[in-house]
Amino acid sequence: MGEKDHSDKELAGRGELSFVPLDVIRRVRHQNAADAIARASLVADLCRLNTLYMIMSAGSGHIGSSFSAMDVLTWLWTDYLVDANSDAHNSDIYFSSKGHDAPALYALLIALEKLDFDLLHKLRRLDGLPGHPDVSTPFIATNTGSLGMGISKAYGMARAKRFAGRQGRVVVMTGDGELQEGQIWESLQPCANEQLGEIVVVVDHNKLQSDSLVTAVSDLGAIEDKFRSFGWEVARADGHDLGRVKDIFARFDRVSDTPKVLIADTVKGKGVSFMEGLACGDQTYHFHAGAPSLENYLAAVDEITARVNGALSRLHQPPLALARAPLPTRVAPSKPEKLVLAYGDELLTMARSRKDIVVLDGDLLSDCGIEAFKAELPDRFIECGIAEQHMVSAAGGMALEGLLPVVHSFACFLSTRANEHIYNNATERRKIIYTATLAGAIPGGPGHSHQSVRDISAVGSVPGLTVIEPSSEREARLSIRWAVETNDASTYLRFVNVPLDLPYSLPASYALEIGKGVTLRDGADVALVGYGPVLLSNAWRAAEELAADGVRAAVINLPWLNRIDDAWTRDVLGTFPVVVTLDNHYRSLGQGVMIAAALARNGVRAAVRTLGLDDVPACGTNAEVLARHGLDAASIATAVRSCIQAKSFTG
Amino acid sequence: MGEKDHSDKELAGRGELSFVPLDVIRRVRHQNAADAIARASLVADLCRLNTLYMIMSAGSGHIGSSFSAMDVLTWLWTDYLVDANSDAHNSDIYFSSKGHDAPALYALLIALEKLDFDLLHKLRRLDGLPGHPDVSTPFIATNTGSLGMGISKAYGMARAKRFAGRQGRVVVMTGDGELQEGQIWESLQPCANEQLGEIVVVVDHNKLQSDSLVTAVSDLGAIEDKFRSFGWEVARADGHDLGRVKDIFARFDRVSDTPKVLIADTVKGKGVSFMEGLACGDQTYHFHAGAPSLENYLAAVDEITARVNGALSRLHQPPLALARAPLPTRVAPSKPEKLVLAYGDELLTMARSRKDIVVLDGDLLSDCGIEAFKAELPDRFIECGIAEQHMVSAAGGMALEGLLPVVHSFACFLSTRANEHIYNNATERRKIIYTATLAGAIPGGPGHSHQSVRDISAVGSVPGLTVIEPSSEREARLSIRWAVETNDASTYLRFVNVPLDLPYSLPASYALEIGKGVTLRDGADVALVGYGPVLLSNAWRAAEELAADGVRAAVINLPWLNRIDDAWTRDVLGTFPVVVTLDNHYRSLGQGVMIAAALARNGVRAAVRTLGLDDVPACGTNAEVLARHGLDAASIATAVRSCIQAKSFTG
């Protein structure tokens, strides 16, 4: 993977990022019209270059999954689909259920001039191309990003077409890890029962989910037998052999009364040798999400370019002329706090002596801070795969048998996909800890399927379940220790994953007390009350801005998201003329509403303003997203000023 | 099914309910010890008699599912399981994942003297035996009632046993309709991958779900192939032929590294000729839930008793001596409002002219008021079966293709099993109507899996989704009309299913206005604000009680569960010195919290008290449950008095 003494800085000297400009794509598309398959392969490689460019520009995105799907995807859109995703009466529909291969589809739609070329520069940017597909983008048929919903959606689309007397196929791409989701199997039989031959599913079977082998996470067993037993027509082929793929689709088109699935054997990261499968020789795949290093990027561009130029040369066409773009600069935090890692470390420390602790993971261990746990205590680590419902109910079974299960996933999935299961466990009154990461509106890149701004509402009323969001590494450690050692009932720990420099610190004597907040910054004119590192940092910066105006704003950390102590409300919040709450969550049914209600119940007469999200979170850089939703420091300061002004008018 | 001129009143003259007393059961169990299978069959029939008694006493319960499972269940507990569900180190575990066969298990546990005999008289009563299993009952291993969780729980239990070095099998009963739930398939592969030979699943394949044929709802296809493709050892047999069942379990015990499933072909309602399968000749099963008529009850008792006496006679034992108990009296409402039927009628009326309306159902059409829709517009009715995730995502696909889907299930399942799916649809900003019935704490009989007191919280923060609960038939009609004709975005309609006599009526001029309530009863001292027929009726009665004390309590209906108009809050609620909110829901994150927050945000200085549930709802009669949670008229009046008193102290 390159030489060690090539630092990113030196390599940057080699130039900038590069992409394939539209005129070059056009020429390749039109000059190779005769051989559809050769053309598709070539266009796919151009799209791989532009996918790499988009991900490097954005700083994140899924290369491996984009590249494994790229060949089939390109063939579908250049050869197979008719009027795909258009308003035409009998249009075909295509969408990706796995969703994180969106950069591949975007690169292709741009190459086919269905999306503006300028969008190439706007992956994961505000009003650009979201990290996961959204119907606000032209030619995107449905919103995906949470796994397992695609075939159900296809069922709905196919039935709707039949209602309306419209023709057209519905082609869905799924991942292979995605087949662990129960909804996939829930959706198969209805499609067969209704004889929905319109539906064609392609399983991008690249054998890797996130950064691990599917077989190591939760083996799929006999995939073909499974689909057949649910009444589907099944084929299997090398997903990079487009001749075979074409033949199979032709066969599929002759079957009108049965839904069809192609198990496409593909290679994750296909097209760049060192990104392909477990090429590095260890058991971890390194190009699932996130941008590659500049060194890897440049090597990948070289390799694809050389292959494309070889093909062009054989076709007697000129070599690629890539366009250049500057390498984006990103300011990294200097001493960022990494709450999730601190949490995981503290959990591991306790687990060394508490043998009842068992960790369950939903295929997100590195994002949940539990890699070290797995490495040290593999016998007490259970990888459940992409199966949140199963994981949470399994934890319930373990708790009934006397264990202390600690369940991990992203907040967006854990709180909503397994919502009824968390409740069912709660009714058994056994102790379970739910650790929900990637909470809140940022990172803003992945898009709304991953921006968890609804989980306080979704789990906050579960009886006996205490919801906490720590604001620092220290509070992260205190929180998991409280959940394990102090709390007799269940806890839902909500974590922000963005590493941040924090302007505040907790008092040295700080200890968690249910429902009580802690003042991080003193002030008398207004209380800014919130939780977690993102908004408490911005509240701090807003307070500094307000101090310049002579407004003394206190910043108060209330890590309890569904417990508010009445005496604390009266004694602490009751001293402020103005209380402004800050939710890294929808305003509706977030912490702010509970604080406002507590003020009312306790007869506190402060002027109250609740800040938070009101609409589906935007996709963009973290700064863009927070500003869009009025949660950056400047917006918070403005809101405080307006609230104080209103108060001074009304008394 | 009996003669028409036998009215229930005349039949009641024949006597009372009857049950098999403990001494009789004991004799049968002990005198037939030699032949385990014959004994099990006989004990099963005694339990059928007691199951019928329990359901008649309770006024509701699932006969069909109890009877189909009874033979296998009895054999398991009398012959196969070792120290089942006990504290013994290597105990076996048994539980029913379908859960609604609880009366059968209770009758059996009582017969085996594992439960106090007195509990026979307390099915679905406060502090008695809940409608669905709960671990607060001895020998109940886990809480079920929502379908599909059982095999995941068994996985957790089996893994926990292995962690602890304990032996013992985990035997799980599932329904056949239950196999439509995706979680079943999500849970199968992990059990096979971990070689959990401890797990034995019995599918009670009685061919009927609720009141319809499984094949008519959502055909299961090749069940055996399905389980095999997920790596399970599969057997199939007549579930009433206990010799065969015994042989299969013996074979299962020789397989240690593979989970096993017995597809038990059974007959719903087995043991009473006219309750067996579709014996009545139409396509509707009449004994799924609810108590039978007295006529049917007596005929069933006669039939089972005759069979038991025949067997006893062949064994030279005396005939059954049944004990008698009085027929419970129940007061029916005189002119009850049936909101769900009114809703369904209005929807059908609109659908006649609006061709874009399509109805989806999750196997609960009679409880959702849409039987008439299906009958009149079968081409626009889609039965999804027990597959809420699939149903909601399918609705999303339909909405994307221009239809207006109206999705139906119980509130507890729709809002929480398909929670992420409702959100995903919302992000696509298409219009969908979710109709959620059986909302709130009553009926109190089915137990907490069915008492939906968390759905406002679970869906209330979904952007663009307006949540409404109508309080009368008229408001039910207004609500669905508003959702179809006026609201551009999506609506979640929450319905109470209990038919009630209503003490109030809406003003003649009433029209729905977002976020604004309507005063049902005038008053100046306190505002009782709530929604829905249950608590508004009790608020009315509390107001009458308070009026006798000279307290003038207004009763205000605010059907908007997540929209509160600021001006209305100031102008109407702002005139009251005391505001008491009433949630047929957890207090935490219900409407009351939003009202209290609205009061605070709008500077209203009223004393505020929020009433609602704080703990998992009790199971019992409707009156028992409401009183237990402080939501009957007397408790509301008491709370109001205490709030007024506190106000007069603090000013």
Image (spheres, coloured by chain):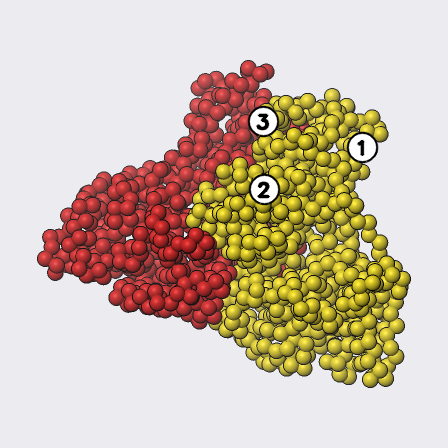
Chain colours: A yellow, B red
Camera-nearest label, 1 or 2: 2
Q: Which residue lies at the image location 41% right of the left edge and 32% below the top edge? A: B627
Q: Chain of mark 2?
A: A
Q: Name the kind of residue labelled 3 in the image.
A: Asp
Question: Image point 52% across, 69% down: which residue?
Answer: A221
* Residue A648 in picture, x, y percent from top left: 77, 23
Task: Give the secondary structure at mark 2.
Answer: helix
Residue indicated by mark 1? A544
Picture quarter with the N terminus of chain A: bottom right
Asked if B86 appears above or below B313 in the picture, the reply is: above
Q: Position of residue A646 (x, y in %)?
A: 76, 27
Q: Going from the N terminus, do you reach mark 1 or mark 2 first?
A: 2
Q: Considering the numbered disc 1 on the image, is that residue within a helix, a strand or a loop?
A: helix
- Residues at discs 1 and 2 both on one chain: yes
Residue A480, disc: 2
> In this rendering, do the residues under marks 1 and 3 share a single chain?
yes
Q: Is residue B510 above or below residue A334?
A: above
- Nearest to the observer: residue B373 or residue A644: A644
Q: Residue at x 63, y 48 (%)?
A: A437
Asked if labels 3 and 2 touch by Cβ distance under 8 angstroms, the answer is no
Q: CA distance from mark 2 to mark 3?
A: 24 Å
* Secondary element at image label 3: helix
Q: Which mark is residue A316?
A: none
Residue sitting at 61 percent across and 44 percent down?
A: A346
Specify few, some or many for label 3: CA neighbours under 10 Å numbering under 14, 14-19, or 20 or more.
some
Report how far apart the C-alphas of labels 1 and 3 lie in the structure: 29 Å
Specify whether disc 2 shares its chain with disc 3: yes
Q: Which residue is mark 3?
A: A566
